[in-house]
Amino acid sequence: MTVPPDTDLPPSPAPAPVLRRRRRLHPLVVGTIAAVIALAAATGVVALLTPGGDDRVVPEVELRFSGDDQDPPAPLVGDDPTGRSLPQGNFSMLAGGLGSFADYRGTPLVVNFFASWCVPCVAEMPAFESVHQQRAAEVAFLGVNLRDSVADATALVERTGVTYDIARDPAGELAGALGVVAMPSTVFVSADGTIVATQAGELSAEELRARLEALFG
């Protein structure tokens, strides 16, 4: 039908607004985004915590645990290592060169962890030297300097006058392998390389003599 040109037409109704529903992200997509963000954050943290250039810490301990068929995993820090064999492998000596626990096989061994920043460690070192002088023919002594610079460790050894062997543990790998959680700590080892007892905390000369007598006669 033709509408006369002069006829007024009612205005057309305005189009209804189009309501758009928000699309929810699929849980898998959300998880993927979260993982990417977490990875980026972790990468940033590692970059901040890892020294660069020539200042990077180079591990000075290479350890593995002895076993019948295969090497068992190293214990977590804080695990009681009693009954385990000492780890195999080499570590740096304060005087230079490399040493290993195998060097002491055949003789009972006292392993004492110490550091220049540990006041009780410094206090007990002359006592350990005194007992070492008395029992050197029957029991070997090995000091392990933990997380110190060579200069600080050397100065401490000279100041306390200890003469037994000193190993270095700048990254704490030996301490972790032997379950050290407190300083000072002492590990008593039988002649066949088995850990027979541990002691956390300072020992006097009398206490150390008593422990050696009870363990090794």
Image (tube, rainbow, N blue to C red):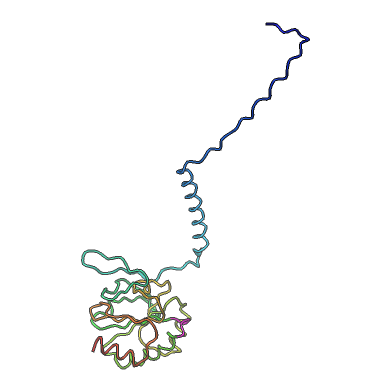
| Quadrant of the rendered image containing residue 88 | bottom left
Depth check: give the residue in front, 133 or 94: 133
Question: Any magenta on residue 189?
Answer: no
Depth check: give the residue in front, 202 or 66: 202
**Residue 48, horizontal then vertical, whole percent:** 53, 62
**Residue 189, horizontal then vertical, whole percent:** 28, 80
- For the stretch drawn in magenta, the main secondary structure is loop
Residue at screen point 49% across, 49% down: 34
- Residue 47 in the image: above or below residue 183: above
- 210 left or right of 57 in image: left
- Residue 121 in the image: above or below residue 54: below
Depth check: give the residue in front, 18 or 206: 18
Point out the image quarter for the N terminus: top right
Point out the image quarter for the C terminus: bottom left
- Residue 217 in the image: above or below residue 94: below
**Residue 94, horizontal then vertical, whole percent:** 40, 80
Stretch in magenta = 115-119
Residue at screen point 25% across, 77% down: 194
| Quadrant of the rendered image containing residue 20 | top right
